[in-house]
Each structure stands twice: as C-alpha cells, then as structure tokens.
Amino acid sequence: MKQVIELEINGEMQELMVEPYDSLLRTLREYAGLTGSKRGCDSGGCGCCTVLVDGKAVYSCMTMVMSTQGKKITTVEGLATDGRLDPLQQSFIDAGAVQCGYCTCGILMASKQLLQDNPHPGDEEIRKGISGNLCRCTGYQKIVDAIRHAAESR
C-alpha cells in the first residue's frame, strides 16, 4: 500500500507516494523524475546508481527509500549550482572522461564523496575511491585524470 514520504532531495523537500519496499533508485527515477542515477545490476555491483545520502556514497538500488527519511539525498542533478556545472563535472568534460555516460553519474557521485573526505587524493586513492563503479567504455585513466584535475583546481 502506497504511503506519503517526505524526502530532502538536492536541497528541496518533496512529498512522494511510495511503496514501503521501494528502493531509493526507483523512487528517484519513477516518482521524483530524477533519471541521472541509472539502473544497472540491481545488486550493488556496478555503481551506476550511486547517490549521496548525508554526504556518503550509497548504491540507491540497494537502499530502501524508507531508510532515507530525515536525511539529505544528493543526486547528480544536484551537483550543478545556478546553472553552472560543478567543477568535478567540468573536469570530466575537459579530460574526455565521459564516453557513453551510463556510469558517469555514479562515478561523479563517488568522486564527490572522495574529494569531500580527501581533498587531495593520489592516483591510487582515486582508484580505490571509485572502485565500486564499473565503466565498460574507458580504461579509467581519463576518469582518474579528471578527478585529480578537479582536486588540483580547488
């Protein structure tokens, strides 16, 4: 039976009708209309659904929406400010780190947490920070370069 839930998504409060067993991913995509987080494996193995919950990267496909009440949810759509891309997003463009784009949103969100926790990571720390995200189009080097560039630009 659907029920109303109030969530803070990208700094805005939203009331949504959800099923108690809905994942955060389904809620974001189907009820909130935020399609940046992608559905991939539905088992926490690919990372393309990664979002931030209270600043921590989580797989939204594995997170029950009911557990996110009272927490701040940030999706890739929430990274841009006043119509300007987040510096991390711009770094991905500048470094050519975006191929098909399916994994990019999840990698951006994992990278966002990484840079919050460690503003100046080395390449190995970057690789570890995004290790829960799979990309089948690149060899990861451009992604690592983009994250390093974003860190250096701060």
Image: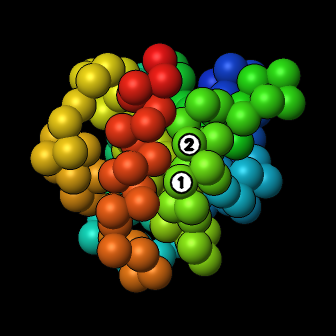
Cα gap from disc 2 to disc 1, whole angstroms: 6 Å
Quadrant of the rendered image containing residue 26: bottom right
Q: Is residue 69 visible?
A: no
Q: Residue at x 38, y 50 (%)?
A: 145
Circle 1 crowding by C-alpha within 10 Å: few under 14, some 14–19, many from 20:
some
Q: Which residue is drawn at 26% across and 59% down?
A: 132
Q: Image quadrant of residue 44? A: bottom left
State the image coordinates of residue 85 (x, y, percent, origin top left).
72, 35
Left or right side of 52 for 4: right
Q: Where is residue 73 in the image (x, y as percent from the top left)?
A: 54, 32
Please name the residue that numbered disc 1 is placed on: 95
Q: What element carries label 2?
A: helix
Residue 68 at x, y percent in the picture: 46, 33
Image height check: is 93 above or below 112?
below
Q: What crowding class fits label 2: few (fewer than 14 Cα within 10 Å), some (14-19), or many (20 or more)?
A: many
**x then y, percent, for residue 17:** 73, 47
> Is any part of residue 151 visible from this angle?
yes
The N terminus lies in quadrant: bottom right
- Identify the residue at the far bottom of this view: 136
What's the residue at 19%, 36% (across, down)?
122
Q: Are marks 2 and 1 in contact (CB under 8 Å)?
A: yes
Residue type at numbered disc 2: Ser
Q: In this view, does 61 lie above or below 53?
A: below
User: Label 2 belongs to which residue?
Assistant: 91
Kindly indicate the quadrant of the structure image that contains residue 152: top left
In the displayed structure image, the side of residue 16 where residue 61 appears, left or right:
left
The vertical placement of 126 against 96, above or below, is above
> Which SS class for mark 1?
loop
Q: Residue at 84% x, 22% y: name it.
A: 82
What is the three-letter code of the residue carrying label 1?
Ala
